[in-house]
């Protein structure tokens, strides 16, 4: 599926790719509407309708991922509300062995998430996911999201990766298409980002539902073929 002998940098999304997306889906689709309905003194159905309509309006933009933006829009502390359900934050069940295997090969393993820095910090606190990565980035520090070509330009300028030797893994098809447009050679989709939901049918990119299928190939190529770099 992947030519590991020709991959020196691995860029990984966080939510749905390394962490179970169930936390985020539960928060944005259920917990925030509940707290918003209580605060605004409207029905839960009305709260869900208003929030969902707003989500669609800003989807893919930096505002969609910005906790400060949603705090302003709802007049609620989004970070505090996330802490109310933080027990749902967890690694995907197959992520640990995959990440350890990657690290043991000496590859440059980089987290690239659209999540707000406060959200990233909370998830690091709950899962210690930072131990698996050489570097962790919230795209907020670049001012643009992974949906934008500017993000890839700014990230490449900072990390110095070669497009032909880089693997990018994400559960979002629009974001994978953005990375493809930029020219990243190796792309992989995660078809089951939420452990409580059915897996997605993905035909546009190579896709997996369990990282275990990659372990043998990763371990078989512990050293990079420098002639390919």
Image (spheres, rainbow, N blue to C red):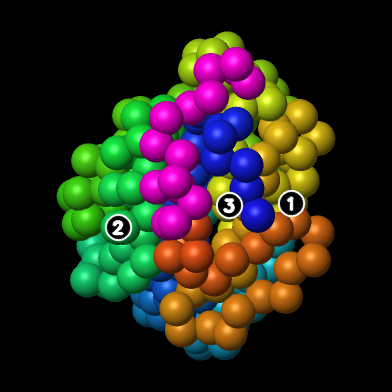
Which of pointers 3 and 2 lies earlier in the amino acid sequence?
2
Along the line of sight, which residue is nearer the eye, 5 or 95? 5
- SS for tag 1? helix
As drawn, is 76 to the left or to the right of 206? left
Along the line of sight, which residue is nearer the eye, 6 or 64? 6
**Which of the 4 image quadrants contains residue 127?**
bottom left
x, y (%) of residue 194? 49, 74
x, y (%) of residue 95? 36, 59
Which of pointers 1 and 2 lies earlier in the amino acid sequence?
2
Along the line of sight, which residue is nearer the eye, 51 or 113? 113
State the residue at coordinates (53%, 24%). 225
Q: Give the alpha-carbon distance from disc 3 to disc 2, as whole Å.
A: 16 Å
x, y (%) of residue 179? 70, 37
Q: Give the alpha-carbon distance from disc 1 to disc 2, as whole Å.
A: 26 Å
Span of residues in magenta:
215-229
As drawn, is 133 to the left or to the right of 69? left
Q: Mark 3 near mark 2, Cβ–Cβ under 8 Å?
A: no
The residue beneath circle 2 is 96
**3 vs 2, front mark:** 2
Q: Give the alpha-carbon distance from disc 1 to disc 3, as whole Å.
A: 10 Å
Residue 68 covered by magenta stretch: no
Above or below 17: residue 50: below
Give the quadrant of the C terminus. Answer: top right
State the residue at coordinates (32%, 62%). 91
Q: Which mark is residue 174?
A: 1
As drawn, is 157 to the left or to the right of 136? right
- SS for tag 3? strand
As drawn, is 203 to the left or to the right of 13? right
x, y (%) of residue 172? 64, 56
The residue beneath circle 3 is 170
**1 vs 3, front mark:** 3
Work out whether residue 36 can be spotted. no
């Amino acid at each position: 599926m992947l030519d590991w002998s020709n991959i020196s940098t691995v860029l990984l999304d966080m939510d749905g790719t390394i962490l179970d997306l169930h936390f985020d889906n539960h928060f944005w689709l259920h917990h925030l509407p509940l707290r918003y309905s209580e605060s605004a003194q409207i029905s839960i159905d009305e709260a869900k309708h208003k929030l969902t309509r707003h989500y669609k309006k800003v989807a893919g933009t930096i505002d969609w991922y910005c906790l400060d933006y949603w705090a302003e829009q709802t007049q609620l502390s989004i970070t505090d509300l996330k802490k109310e359900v933080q027990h749902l934050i967890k690694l995907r069940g197959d992520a640990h062995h995959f990440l350890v295997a990657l690290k043991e090969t000496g590859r440059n393993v980089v987290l690239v998430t659209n999540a707000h820095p406060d959200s990233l910090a909370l998830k690091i606190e709950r899962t210690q996911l930072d131990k698996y990565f050489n570097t962790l980035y919230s795209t907020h520090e670049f001012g643009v999201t992974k949906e934008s070509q500017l993000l890839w330009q700014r990230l490449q300028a900072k990390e110095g990766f070669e497009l032909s030797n880089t693997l990018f893994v994400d559960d979002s098809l629009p974001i994978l298409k953005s990375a493809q447009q930029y020219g990243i050679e190796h792309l992989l989709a995660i078809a089951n980002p939420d452990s409580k939901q059915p897996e997605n049918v993905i035909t546009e990119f190579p896709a997996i539902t369990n990282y275990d299928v990659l372990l043998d190939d990763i371990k078989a190529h512990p050293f990079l073929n420098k002639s390919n770099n």
